[in-house]
Amino acid sequence: MRHALDRGIDYFDTAEGYTDGASEETLGRALRGVRGKVTLASKVSADADARVEDLLRALEGSLRRLQTDRIDLYFNHAVNDVDRLKNPAWGEFTERAVAQGKIRFRGMSGHGGRLAECLDYALDHDLVDAVLVAHNFGQDPAFYQRLTASLDFVAVQPELPRLLAKAKEKKVGVIAMKTLRGARLNDLRAYERGGNTFAQAAFRWVLSGPHVDALVVTMTSTEQVDEYLGASGATGVSGSDLELLARYEARNGTTQCRYGCGTCLAACPEGVAIDEVLRTRMYADDYGDLRLAKREYAGIARNAQACVSCAHQACTGACPFGIDIARLTAPAHRRLA
């Protein structure tokens, strides 16, 4: 944290749900004495039936753990149901919290299959000052159009460019997350040249877009801080960047679930939340964070238990990107349940 501050990083993102509040506590301790120099973001899950008093109580808990009297940007966390935004409690809560000086700006985060619908509603009804959305080269058709190699591709979020432009027109800040497309960083070291890395290439792709103001990414070492900052201020992507991204996609495209797709969900007769299961698998296998993966998996209402003894195999061929769903979901349940 201190190294990041010394290198000029001044935006820090957390949530009450990250490690059951421990993330906020750690961040609060780390920012003692420098709170005024940083922009601090946190999140709360304001459900469709949330009450104002519940949200105010959650905010007070975050303020206490963060050891601060205000949160600069407070997100409605992981919104994938427009009913959560239609709940008047969110608007009333944020209005009161802003008036009290306990939050400065309102936000919405999301990466689910209904992200476009939720963003449209939030922007049309002026519910947010900033949005935090999954955005990476693997979701952008323009990435594939710029490659000489032929790759099969189905646009995951064809509405996302329009929505990001809409956000900018409304002067709503845009922050990108999930920018590494699964974070399998060690696959490409043999192809990295001149000090440029896959992570930097992925970040440059996002930051060079016309609508993204910033991105958030987990950093676990001072070396990562230094590496990732190599992409700061990017204005474009190079040919070598595109080569690295293409190699990554060729290696990992049939194991990495695309954020915001959801095409496969209708195929499962058991209603398994396939995309959520594969997301938690990514936390375990790609992030190397088994504890996080198990905690997130425990929160999935329709997990992959049914996949272990499934005789339907209805998900075969359901992924437009060629992911062998059954080969991944059943082992994920055995490991994470």
Image (tube, rainbow, N blue to C red):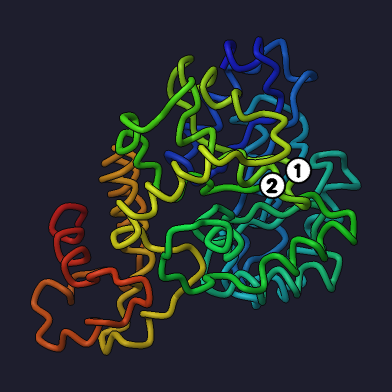
User: What residue appears at the point 56 percent right and 17 percent down from the top-left corner?
Assistant: 1
Residue tagged 1: 213
The earlier-in-sequence mark between 2 and 1 is 2
Numbered disc 1: secondary structure: loop
Q: Horizontally, is 168 left or right of 227 in the view? A: right
> Residue 158: x and y, percent?
62, 73
User: What residue appears at the point 70 percent right and 71 percent down from the top-left corner?
Assistant: 85
User: What residue appears at the point 75 percent right and 69 percent down from the top-left corner?
Assistant: 162
Q: Residues within 10 Å of mark 2 (few under 14, many from 20)?
A: many
> Residue 283: x and y, percent?
34, 46
Numbered disc 2: secondary structure: strand
Residue tagged 2: 175
Foreground pick, 324 / 189: 189
User: What residue appears at the point 59 percent right and 23 percent down from the top-left corner?
Assistant: 230
Task: Specify the quadrant of the image occupied by residue 318.
Answer: bottom left
| As drawn, 101 above or below 6 | below
Foreground pick, 278 / 72: 278
Amino acid type, callout 2:
Ile
Foreground pick, 271 / 234: 234
> Residue 157: x and y, percent?
58, 70
Number of the label disc, if any, that sits on residue 312? none
Amino acid type, callout 1:
Asp
Q: Horizontally, is 248 left or right of 175 in the view? A: left
Foreground pick, 162 / 45: 162
Task: Specify the quadrant of the image occupied by residue 279.
Answer: bottom left
Q: Quadrant of the C terminus?
A: bottom left
Separation (CA) of disc 2 from disc 1 = 6 Å
Task: Specify the quadrant of the image occupied by residue 91.
Answer: bottom right
Q: Horizontally, is 1 left or right of 211 in the view? A: left
Contact check, label 2 and label 1, Cβ < 8 Å: yes
| As drawn, 8 above or below 53 | above
